[in-house]
Image (cartoon, rainbow, N blue to C red):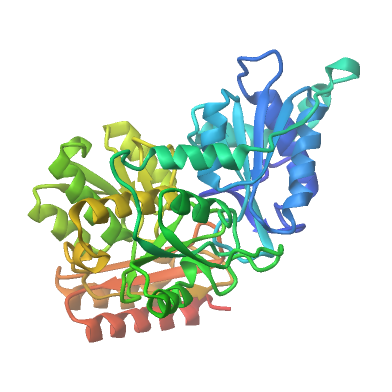
Amino acid sequence: MAIAKLFGTDGVRGQANAGVMTVENALQIGRAVGILIDSRHARPRVIIGKDTRRSGYLFEHALLAGLCSVGAEPYLVGVLPTPGIAYMTSSMRADAGVVISASHNPFQDNGIKLFGRDGFKIADEMERRIEHLVAEPQPLQDGLAHGEDIGRAYRIEDAWGRYVVQLKHTFPADLTLDGVKIAIDCGNGAAFRIAPAVFEELGATVVRLAVQPNGTNINDGCGALHPEQLGRAVVEHGCDLGIALDGDADRLILCDEHGEIVDGDRVMAICALRMAKQGTLRGGAVVATVMSNFGLEIALRHAGLQLIRTDVGDRHVVEAMRKHGYNLGGEQSGHLVFLDHATTGDGTLAALQLCAIAVREGKRVSELAEVMHPLPQVLINLPVRDKPPIDTLPAVSKVISQAEGELAGLGRVLVRYSGTERKCRVMVEGQDEHQVRKHAERIADSVRMAIGI
């Protein structure tokens, strides 16, 4: 039997109750994790958490059953952000952590992400071993427990409170947010009670947005993917800034006091320059992906710092950071990683770091954001019916080459497929916005003609 392809760029993800995201696969993944993880306990201990999607109940109980059936002990933490589950995994000395979430995807989708005992995402090799067991399940049947060897589950009621305390510890002890007014859009996702609690307990006045999840409204016109309502709320309520999180709260988009968007690139620039001044930026560099704006590279270069680029995905960013000893990295989309405080992207934590800089320097967010001036960039996301290599599409390759020639080294063209959705992303960047948009639309048209839906 051919080995099923379960894992994409960020775990298993797809429409709930279809394709790879079935209850049957979740059950088998639970069994595979219970059998494969190297446990330091009498029984393997696995943290299971989820976001607010209705389908989370399906996969939570399927994973629980799979783990118990091979003698493991699952610990249910309920609704908790992805970085919170990573934290609980390492702080509880568990052997693995499982996140049930499709992050920024619509509520119809769901996913499974796995963390190792150190709180970092599991290695590719472990993913392949899990895939092999799911495709060739006889070893899973052989590993079934019986009698007293069957595992039992536990529920941790105060996981969200523990995570709130951890987040507050990342904020400088000599500072408070007294007098600061913040609008927080939680995207009806996993941080709907955690993020407001953190900032309120640090002294801020919080305007709460999208904090009433009902199982189907996660990411629905709100959160980090749709910060428009946040910008309006910041202006309407006279806030000092706005914070938008996605469904699993590992992503952050900010609004300044005027309601203008401050993306992940600008947050990285602000934090990198402050950390460099304090002597806490390790390696004199920031790690970002090929999608980050060239303006970030320019801002860092002026400060004597480097920008190290990786493939798209916070997983690649973290791998490069760990390999070379850097402690700040992220993506333009808002996955921001502060390795001194966390093992994965954390939107709430990143917002706290930015707030600490604003308070300490006595500056508005709009003033801080002036450290970076983005070059005009156009990103078009296109639904596609399949994902053939771009260089096998002659018409598309021709238009890309023409664009690169006209940009003459003063811009960039990047055409790539999403790792989690059936989409092609066309990004063009350059000095002139009209020229950039023209090239992006021409390339997008060629992709539509070749493989569009």
Image quadrant in which the N terminus is located = top right
The single residue placed furthest to the right in the displayed view is: 147
Q: Which of 172 and 441 is in front in this view?
A: 172
Rendered residue at 64%/33% (across/down): 47
Location of residue 357 in the rendering, given as x and y in whole percent from the top left corner? 25, 52
Q: Do we see residue 85 in this rendering?
A: no
Along the line of sight, the residue nearer the viewer: 382 or 274: 274
Q: Considering only vertical position in the picture, is 146 above or below 88?
A: above
Percent position (x, y) of residue 205? 43, 61
Q: In this view, does 106 lie above or below 398?
A: above
User: Which quadrant of the structure image shows residue 443?
Assistant: bottom left
Residue 173 x/y as whole percent: 32, 38
Q: Say how many tags the image has.
A: 0
* The C terminus - image quarter: bottom right
Horizontal side of 108 relative to 248 (left or right) equals right
Foreground of the two, 356 or 124? 356
Residue at image point 70% right, 24% down: 35
Residue 42 drawn above or below residue 81: above
Give residue 32's position: percent from left, percent from top.
70, 31
Residue at figure coordinates x 66%, y 63% from the top left: 213
Q: Residue at x 69, y 34 (%)?
A: 156
From where the camera sits, is residue 333 visible? yes
State which quadrant residue 236 falls in. Answer: bottom left
* Residue 126 in which image quadrant: top right
